[in-house]
Amino acid sequence: MAAVKNALIVGGGPAGLCAAAALAKRGIDVEIAEINTDTRPLGSGVSMMGPTLRALGMVDGEALKRCVDEGFGHHALSFGNPEGQIVQRVELPKPAGPEYPGGCGIMRPAFWGLLAEIAEKAGARIRLSTTASAIEPAADHVNVTLTDGSTAAYDLVVGADGLHSKVRDLAFPGATQPFFTGQTVWRVTLPRPDEISDGIAMFYGPRNKVGCSPVSDDEMYIFIVENTAEITRPPQEEWPAIVQGLLSDYSGVIAWVRERVTDPARIDRRPLHALLVPSPWYRGRVLLIGDAVHAATPQLAMGAGIAIEDAVVLGEVLESQADLGDALAEFMERRWERCRLVVENSLQLGEWEKHPDDPQADPAGLMDASLAVLAGAF
Ligand SMILES: Cc1cc2nc3c(=O)[nH]c(=O)nc-3n(C[C@H](O)[C@H](O)[C@H](O)COP(=O)(O)OP(=O)(O)OC[C@H]3O[C@@H](n4cnc5c(N)ncnc54)[C@H](O)[C@@H]3O)c2cc1C
């Protein structure tokens, strides 16, 4: 067991909450510093592939069961045309085990709430409305000052504070920064029609891609990937009309959807960014995990999955290695290739969405191949 008795995790998203659970279960005294007033974000649904479910089960088996019970099981990815006809179907592998589906959709507040529960159940303490203002490495510990004015020494500091990581800025000066990928995703929570029951169904139109992901018996969320050369910020009251316009090329189920997009409060809009910080993701006793080092666009729906896998591997290497440096080197060795694959293949899928006439474009093939690799052990 690496000599880590206490750890500070900055950021209470999937990476931070699961890392907290994985470390606290191994007897490490864990604090989470989360900048928001709550660990349950508003917003739409989230889709998880089989590897995400497997990683969640490795952190907490009960949480996996609850996630699948509270969400909606997925079995396949379907690919359709603007007329709403499904023309290709990719069966999802089931790395979480035959008793679990190959994927799952769930509302974000429910999923994040579940993760906060498992972190606290394992013994981690969550400090809200605070973040690190200074990180000062010393010989055998790291001194951290939080914005609430407190200072403490930690054996390990984990930056799990997402795309715009403060820990990255403080402890990794000059690190690679996220970049805008030229796409914006709109998500809308809507009633689920019976025909959206197999998993994520995606329809490729002349200007954009639209997908439907079921999250419960009653609800689904749709996502529209708009190609946007620059980041724009239209006023929220205009969002329903803009979304209706983006859906105007489609018939079938998406035409049914279009009529129901009326409430701006049910719409979420995010310009997409990506990031892959070169190895190593640690400096001394400070480690970055999750979106802070490998932010993938959502095309493979695996960003949260690789964040949770980071947490699993961090727990394992701290348990199996006697030396922290060896543990973090093993962490890096085990995490790089899978995270690179998710970030780069997601970007490739986005590029094909921007250039649908590319003769190489084969989204179903690349998703199938990527998920087959990711279903393997990590
Ligand atoms: C539009 C969109 C759709 C997506 N859909 C999916 C999907 O369907 N499936 C999927 O697997 N992934 C999806 N992703 C990606 C996924 O959301 C992320 O990869 C995942 O949330 C990363 O987890 P994380 O914990 O590393 O970071 P985050 O989820 O970003 O969590 C970071 C946490 O740190 C906190 N924080 C931020 N700054 C600070 C600070 N300075 N101090 C303290 N705390 C701080 C934040 O409040 C947050 O709680 C999507 C992403 C986007 C943009």
Image: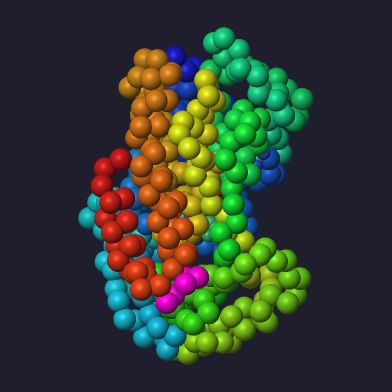
As displayed, is residue 45 above or below residue 158?
below
Tell me residue 250's x, y (percent). Answer: 49, 87
Q: Residue at x 30, y 40 (%)?
A: 378
Task: Look at the image and tell me whether residue 288 can be seen.
Answer: yes
Q: Which residues are magenta?
A: 353-357
Q: Nearer the viewer, residue 349 or 319?
A: 349
Q: Residue furthest front?
A: 359
Main SS class of the magenta portion in the image = loop
Q: Nearer the viewer, residue 365 or 49?
A: 365
Look at the image and tell me in which quarter the N terminus lies: top left
Task: Look at the image and tell me whether residue 106 can be seen.
Answer: no
Q: Residue at x 57, y 55 (%)?
A: 273
Q: Residue at x 69, y 34 (%)?
A: 131
As displayed, is residue 69 above or below residue 152?
below
| Number of on-image labels | 0
Tell me residue 316's x, y (percent). Answer: 36, 29
- Horizontal side of 40 relative to 196 (left or right) equals right
Q: Residue at x 36, y 86 (%)?
A: 85
- Horizontal side of 150 relative to 59 (left or right) equals right
What's the image's color scheme?
rainbow
Q: Residue furthest left?
A: 98
As displayed, is residue 370 above or below residue 185?
above
As displayed, is residue 195 above or below residue 111?
below
Q: Residue furthest top?
A: 139
Tell me residue 277's x, y (percent). Answer: 51, 40
Location of residue 311 (image quadrant): top left
Tell me residue 14's x, y (percent). Answer: 50, 45
**In magenta segment, residue 157:** no
